[in-house]
Image (tube, rainbow, N blue to C red):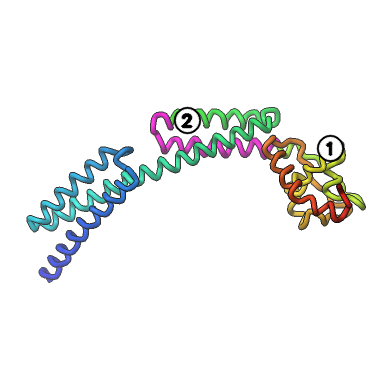
Amino acid sequence: SEKANFAKLICRATNGVEKAKKDIEEAKNVKAEELSPDLMKSAEDNLKLASDYLSKKDYAKALEYADKASENAVEAKKMVEIKKKAEELLAQAKADVKEAKDLKVKKDAPELLTSAVDSLDKSIENDNKKEYLKVIENATKASNDAKAAIAASVAANIKLYNVVKGDCLWNIAKDKAVFGDPLLWPLIYKANLSQIKYPDLIFPDQKFEIPKKYSPDIKEDATQQAEKAKYYFRDILKIK
């Protein structure tokens, strides 16, 4: 009926104004006005109009402007989220490109590395211009290309080691033809997780991938892990 529809309109308008207030408050809490001052001003202006029309009992207009206020506030809040995502992806892209450079992948994947560096430069430029959607696009490409370059370089620099009776990861890593450093055995372990269930349990005729290239950070991490886990080999081989 007409009365029922009118009652529903009153309820929708009232709830719409309250929702708009809540949306604006949430946007303010994340400081959306610093990034999107125009949107936040529009939100405040539309909320005022909605409140005025509500007091005048023009419920259709009140609902119309309340919806606009909510849309403005939600969009402003979304811009903050986009900026945060852009910052995260840009930081990750910088780390990924640095890792690729540290691993010196240029020889094995020059085109991918060049593309990663170019995309990172564009992302930084986009960030300076506050073009956050483009930051996300280019940072994502930079990370993907850097990771692909690393993968290509790793694949080009892996040799196989055939396990013989009496071998252990410690002694394999100690072999001068492998690493010449027993504390780098975690590199072999991590490269062959599909074959090695426990670091101290390997079998003759297994073929392990031996990474020939790794960054200083990866080497340091492997060494620290080996130092903590020396008891694996100390107990079995009486290593001092």
The circle drawn on residue 180 is: 1
Tags 2 and 1 touching, CB below 8 Å: no
Which quadrant of the figure has residue 153? Answer: top right
Q: CA distance from mark 2 to mark 1?
A: 41 Å
The circle drawn on residue 124 is: 2
Q: Position of residue 5 (x, y in %)?
A: 15, 67
Which quadrant of the figure has residue 223? Answer: top right
Range shown magenta: 127-153
Amino acid type of the residue tagged 1 in the rendering: Gly
Badge 1 crowding class, 10 Å Cα cut-off, few under 14, some 14 to 19, many 20 or more, is few
Q: Position of residue 145 (x, y in %)?
A: 59, 36
Q: Position of residue 95 (x, y in %)?
A: 57, 36
Q: Residue furthest front?
A: 240
Q: Is residue 59 left or right of residue 81?
A: left
Q: Position of residue 88 (x, y in %)?
A: 48, 41
Count the marks: how many?
2
Q: Residue at x 50, y 40 (%)?
A: 89
Query: Looking at the image, which is closer to me, 27 or 226?
Result: 226
**Main SS category, magenta section:** helix
The secondary structure type at the circle numbered 2 is helix
Q: Is residue 155 magenta?
A: no
Q: Residue at x 52, y 39 (%)?
A: 140
Which quadrant of the figure has residue 143? Answer: top right
